[in-house]
Image (cartoon, helix red, strand yellow):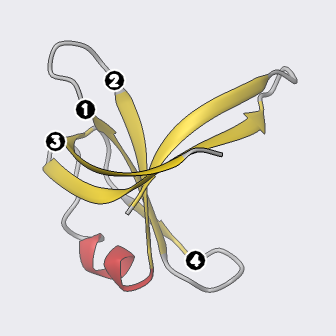
Amino acid sequence: MSVSKAVISGIAVRDAEKRYPSDNLATLNFTMNINETEETLLRVVMYGNLADSAEGLIKKGSLVTVEGRLQTNTYKGANGEDKKVVELRA
């Protein structure tokens, strides 16, 4: 796992989705495009009060600036391959 701090701006490519996983902590997820000339997507995850505050503000097409830490996660894809995803945890 690689962790670093970042401040990244981009355009939200879909509305933010709020969920309450089993620990009952609000979690807000959305994806943003961080490159104007080509599609470079970054998944953003927010928790707790920040998730509650940002829920109604992040809509598709919104300009968003987020500060957090970059985290790389690995998971098994549908075909059994290992896949990596980079998330910005606000």
Residue of label 4: 20
Which quadrant of the structure image shows residue 79?
A: top right
Q: Distance between the residues labelled 2 and 3?
A: 15 Å
Pointer 4 or 2: first along the chain: 4
Image x and y of residue 14, in percent: 32, 43
Q: Distance between the residues labelled 3 and 1?
A: 12 Å
Q: Which residue is drawn at 75% across and 38% down?
A: 75
User: Do callouts 3 and 4 mark residues in contact (Cβ within 8 Å)?
Assistant: no
In the foreground, 72 or 16:
72
Amino acid identity at mark 1: Ile
Q: How far apart are marks 4 and 2 (CA)?
A: 28 Å
Q: How far apart are marks 3 and 4 (CA)?
A: 25 Å
Q: Which residue is drawn at 82% across and 21% down?
A: 81
Residue 79 left/right relative to 61: right
Residue of label 2: 40
Nearer to us of marks 4 and 2 is: 2
Nearer to us of marks 3 and 1 is: 1
Pointer 1 or 4: first along the chain: 4
Residue 82 left/right relative to 42: right
Image x and y of residue 80, in percent: 87, 24
Q: Which residue is drawn at 26% across and 80% down?
A: 53
Q: Residues within 10 Å of mark 4 (few under 14, many from 20)?
A: few
Residue extending furthest toward the right: 80
Amino acid identity at mark 3: Gly
User: Do callouts 1 and 2 mark residues in contact (Cβ within 8 Å)?
Assistant: yes
